[in-house]
Image: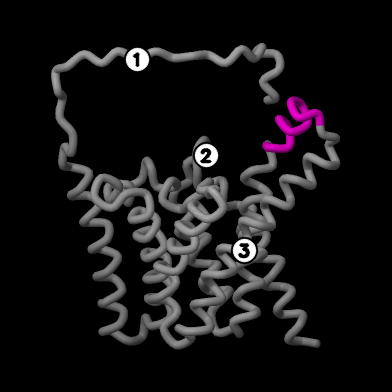
Amino acid sequence: MKKGLRLRWRWGLAVALGACWPLAFAPFDLSFLAIVLLLALFWLSDAVTPSAAATIGFAFGFGAFAAGIYWLAIPLHNFAHMSWLLSAGAVALLALYCAIYPALSLWVAAKWWAHSRLFALPFLWIGAEWLRAHLFTGFPWLATGYSQTWSLLGGWAPLLGQYGVGLATAGVAALILFLIRHRANRRKAAAAIGGIVLLYTGAAFSQDIHWTARMHKQLTVRLIQGDVPVTENGM
């Protein structure tokens, strides 16, 4: 009973943490929050069974997407003429589907990398995001890398793309948690600090490089505006 209560507490906390996930993205741009939330999620899912890790990841994912895509219910109601109940249900189903991917990443880490999951989790987390972006035509919203668009880690984007930035973000979260747990071990603590410094230093150097150059060639662009009255834009 006591164990079940502890697990339910982790589920509730995971949902709450997930609901904060959209704050790391525009228009809030609290990029540091992505690292904090991933660190907390990795901590919650550490030292638990694979099934427990999966449910924690699922709870986090549902909270994140329910909070991040709730507004889709508005155009479904206004343009598809669905009732509020049906439109909210459709968004909830989409959030439940998207929650499968973080659950999968935490489950695989606990199943096959139980003793080294902090090293595997960043790769599995981003791998699950890539899968979500491509499977069944894909739904890449709220991907970790986009949270760092205006942060220092965003400097990896020209070299590694959005997924590389996301990997660096998840890597920093895992390294900080590793540092907290092994702070008494000087060698491990130094390795964790070195990894964090390396990720930020590399991003800083990349930001200082001008990766594009002007071609001195005029580009003509035409924009087509959809024939939708502003009063019916659904927002």
Q: Amino acid at mark 3?
A: Ile
Q: Position of residue 123 (x, y in %)?
A: 40, 68
Q: CA distance from mark 2 to mark 3?
A: 26 Å
Quadrant in the rendering for residue 216: top left
Residue 166 shown left or right of residue 70 in the figure: left
SS class, disc 3: helix
Give the mark toward the camera: 2 or 3.
Answer: 3
Q: Position of residue 86 (x, y in %)?
A: 83, 42
Q: CA distance from mark 3 to mark 1?
A: 40 Å
Give the mark toward the camera: 2 or 1.
Answer: 1
Work out whether mark 2 precedes mark 3 in sequence or the reverse, and give the earlier one.
Answer: 2
Q: Residue, x 37% and y 71% (percent of image)?
A: 175
Tell me, for residue 221, which label it has, or none: 1
Quadrant in the rendering for residue 70: top right
Q: Residue, x 58% and y 74% (percent of image)?
A: 44
Magenta stretch contains residue 75 = yes
Disc 3 packing (10 Å; few <14; some 14–19; many ≥20): some
Magenta segment: 72-81
Work out whether mark 2 precedes mark 1 in sequence or the reverse, and give the earlier one.
Answer: 2
Quarter holding the N terminus is: bottom right
Which residue corresponds to mark 3?
100
Magenta stretch contains residue 175 = no
Main secondary structure found in the magenta portion: helix
Colour approach in the figure: one colour
How many numbered circles are shown? 3
Q: Position of residue 221 (x, y in %)?
A: 34, 15
Quadrant in the rendering for residue 220: top left
Quarter holding the C terminus is: top right
Which residue corresponds to mark 2?
28
